[in-house]
Amino acid sequence: MGRDQTLVVVGAGLAGIRACESARRASHEGPIVLVGDEPHLPYDRPPLSKAMLVAPDDAQVDVQLRPASVLEDELGVRVLTSTTALALDTERRNLHTTGGDLGYDELIIASGATARRLPEDRKYSGILALRTLDDARRVRKALSNRARVVVIGAGFIGSEIASAARKLGAAVTIVESAPAPLIRSLGTQIGALCADLHRDHGTDLRLDTTITAIHPRDDAEPDADGRYPVGAVELSDGTTLHADVVVAGIGASPSTAWLKNSGVQLHHRDGGVMCDEHLAAVDETGAAIAHVWAAGDVAHWPNPLFDRTMRLEHWTSAADQGALAARNALAAPEDRRPYSTVPYFWSDWYETRIQFVGVPQAEEVLVQHRRDERGGTVALYRAGQRLIGVLTIGRPDLIMKYRRLVAGSATFQEGVDFGAAS
Ligand SMILES: Cc1cc2nc3c(=O)[nH]c(=O)nc-3n(C[C@H](O)[C@H](O)[C@H](O)COP(=O)(O)OP(=O)(O)OC[C@H]3O[C@@H](n4cnc5c(N)ncnc54)[C@H](O)[C@@H]3O)c2cc1C
């Protein structure tokens, strides 16, 4: 792109900021505009469900990804906070926002995902979800007075919130509709191992259970918005739990309402942006839309390493995709690179780090070490002869070595041999 050409990035999160940095690294000299609907400069989300919830105040945890001076002065990025993208016209190359229209030469969609919330949160106070910095502040405040906490969903975010609440001395119940935590991410067998972590730390984990009703606290007055404080939840197993706080950890959906009618193909189930292997957004026919790219939690793309299309909600892929989408946007067509990766995520439960590389759709899962002499667990995932995934619990020293094995298409036996020697 030439000197005067404008790169517009929608979404001032991790993928968005990495796109801006990468564009400057690729010697883009033209204007860069970063459009974000939150009032904050880009910040990091992982600490929001971990350190931030147990810290006495914000000063103890620095979540900012780059200070304003670096963003504006060093990187020369014009950051439009509290500005929402409303519509995209790919023919005229125009982005319509709450702050007016922005023309672009290249545009990157990095609008991430939005937490699903319970409909009752409009009726009762104390029903929360956690996606944003402001959400985290609300959850921290609610947990601070040794509340009785009910977490809905034993996924990563729900489990981390439960861990933080236990650290703060709260009585915590997790209500999970599936027979084990994390079945979609790790499979049933390993989900059951993760369940033990909750039980070992005094969290009451109700599996195969749903919430059937939510009730306000007896004799309570409504707040200024007319909402009554939550008081109890009824469960499908017939029990009623007293609750001062209910936190929904029930997943997130791609933030793409603004792309309706843009011609960008949205995933038939979750509404994410469909991309080609270079992270170019595609139209309904599957053809790349000129000058429009996507990255991060919002993007589905065909991962050549696993021969399937996927959308990840992981820190590492959001950062890497942001950087590559910008690089590809600025490169000549013959210099564009496909995005190929071994998915990686981590999650911190209590004092333990859970890490996973690869994909979990396995024919066999072998738990090779269970609470070994270092207290660690390692499980290997097999499809055909291939090692397709590895989970470690409490063995952060091993996970990147396994990631290299999976990336190199190692056989399952090579994974077993490596595990026996380590
Ligand atoms: C609480 C929490 C903890 C996590 N912990 C881990 C972890 O331990 N390990 C791990 O691997 N991953 C973790 N993740 C996942 C990781 O943080 C995400 O994958 C990553 O933040 C995604 O980055 P993104 O830039 O794609 O999207 P986001 O971070 O969601 O950023 C998108 C931004 O775009 C904005 N936006 C949306 N729509 C519009 C619009 N129309 N106009 C303007 N702006 C818009 C959003 O408000 C948001 O600010 C965690 C996520 C959360 C929420």
Image (cartoon, grey):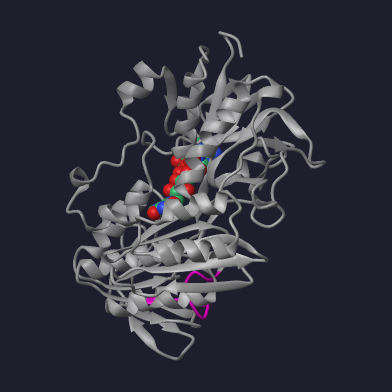
Lateral position of residue 179 relative to residue 171, left or right: right
Q: Majority secondary structure of the magenta segment?
A: loop
Asked if residue 347 shows in the view, the reply is yes
Depth check, front residue: 365 or 40 = 365
Q: Position of residue 20 (x, y in %)?
A: 48, 26
* Observer able to see residue 361: no
Residues rendered magenta in the picture: 174-183
* Quadrant housing the N terminus: top right
Residue 176: within the magenta? yes
Position of 120 relative to 301 (above/below): below
Q: Using the image, determine if residue 166 lies above or below residue 101.
A: below
What residue sits 19% from the left and 49% below the top?
57
Compared with 24, 164 (above or below) is: below
> Which quadrant of the structure image shows residue 230?
bottom left
Q: Residue 287: where, in percent of width, then height?
A: 79, 36
Residue furthest to the right: 285
| Residue 61 position by quadrant | top left
Query: Residue most toward the bottom?
Result: 238
**Residue at 30% across / 21% down in the picture?**
69
